[in-house]
Image (cartoon, rainbow, N blue to C red):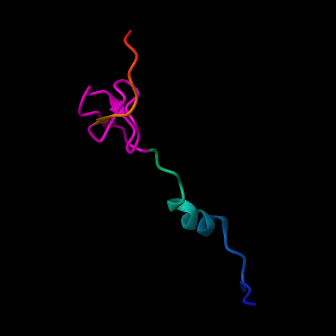
């Protein structure tokens, strides 16, 4: 098996890991009610997804 000849420094380890962070999904606006909603999810306010009502929204 291959083994490293020298120990990688903390700096090089950090540079390698610099792109490994998790990015937060950017919310978009619901086309029906204009509320922020995460992509590929049903709108919590109106219950619509891709133009169809999947969940009946509560009236408050």
What residue span does the magenta drawing correspond to? 25-51
| Quadrant of res 55 | top left
Say if 35 sits above or below 11 in the image.
above
Residue 6 percent across, percent down from the top left: 72, 82
The question of residue 33 being in magenta is answered with yes
Q: Residue at x 37, y 32 (%)?
A: 43
Q: Residue furthest left?
A: 31
Q: Residue 58: give x, y in percent of width and height.
A: 40, 16
Going by the image, does 20 lie left or right of 43? right
Q: Residue 47 occupies which quadrant of the picture? A: top left
**Residue in the image at 75% along x and 90% along y:** 1
- Report the residue at 67% width, 74% height from top: 8
Of 23 and 30, the residue lying toward us: 30
Q: Position of residue 50 (x, y in %)?
A: 29, 42
Q: Position of residue 59 (x, y in %)?
A: 37, 12
Q: Residue at x 24, y 34 (%)?
A: 31
Overall secondary structure of the magenta section:
loop
Hey, which quadrant is residue 52 in on the image? top left
Residue 31, compared with residue 20, is above or below; it is above
């Amino acid at each position: 098996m291959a083994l490293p000849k020298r120990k990688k420094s903390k700096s090089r380890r950090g540079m390698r890991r610099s792109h490994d962070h998790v990015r937060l999904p950017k919310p978009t606006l619901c086309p029906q009610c204009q509320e922020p909603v995460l992509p590929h999810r049903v709108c919590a306010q109106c219950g619509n997804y891709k133009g169809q009502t999947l969940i009946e929204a509560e009236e408050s």
